Amino acid sequence: MINLLDKLNELKLDNKKIFLIAFVGLLIVYVDFAFIIKLQLQGIRTATPKIIKLKKDVDNLAKDLSWMQDLERKASKDKRTLKPKEIISEDKVLLLLQEVSDLANKNRVKIMQINTSKDAKVQEEVIAGEKLSPIIITLDLTCGYHSLGSFINALENARQYIDVEDMKIIRDPRDYLLQNVNLVLKTYARK
C-alpha cells in the first residue's frame, strides 16, 4: 500500500504545470469555438435554405414527372385510337355539309348560312401523289364561345379532313352572351 502512495506522490504535478495544461486546454477549446465551430455553424445556416429549396425542387420534379408519365400513357392510348383522315369525293360534298350541320347542332351552334365553293386561288393540289380539289366551306354562325370551341374540336375530330382557314368573331348586338362568327373551312375532294 505504501508503494502505491509513493507512486501517486511522484505523479503529482506542481501548480505551474497544472495551470499550463489547463491554459493550453482552454486555448484549444477557445480556438475551436472561435474559428472552426463558428465556420461550421455559418455553413449550416447558409446550407439550410438551399437544402429546403432543393427538397421543394425535387418534390416538384417528382410531381411533374408523374404528370408527364400520365400524359404519355394517355397519348399512347390516343395514338392507338386515331384513324387517318378521310378525303371525300366531289359527289359527297353534300354529305359532308350534312355532317358539319349535325356537329353544329350537337354543340349548340346555330348555322345561319352555309356556302361551298372551290378555292379560286388553287385549281388542284397534289397531295401524297393524288390530285385533290380544295373546297371552301363558309359558315355564318351564332353561338357562345364555349359552344364554338367544342364545335371546332368536333370538326378536328371528324372522320373527314377539315381545316379551319379563317374565323371572324363579332359580339351579337342583341345578346351579349352570343357571338356572330364567320368560319371558313377548307377540305379536299377527289375527282
Image (cartoon, rainbow, N blue to C red):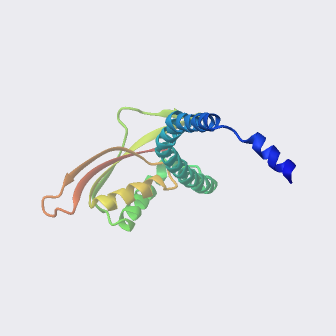
Q: Residue at x 37, y 65 (%)?
A: 107
Q: Residue at x 38, y 60 (%)?
A: 150
73 vs 34, nearest the viewer: 34
Report which quarter residue 6 is drawn in.
top right
Judge whether residue 156 can be spotted in this image: yes
- Residue 76, image x, y percentages: 62, 53
Q: Is residue 142 left or right of residue 39?
A: left
- Residue 13, image x, y percentages: 69, 38
Judge whether residue 190 can be spotted in this image: no
54 vs 149, nearest the viewer: 54
32 vs 140, nearest the viewer: 32
Q: Is residue 28 left or right of residue 108?
A: right
Q: Is residue 170 left or right of residue 107?
A: left
Q: Is residue 33 left or right of residue 97?
A: right
Look at the picture and state if 149 lies above or below 128. below
Give the mark count: 0
Q: Residue furthest front?
A: 2
- Residue 18, image x, y percentages: 63, 38
Look at the picture and state if 33 lies above or below 185. above
Q: Residue at x 20, y 51 (%)?
A: 170
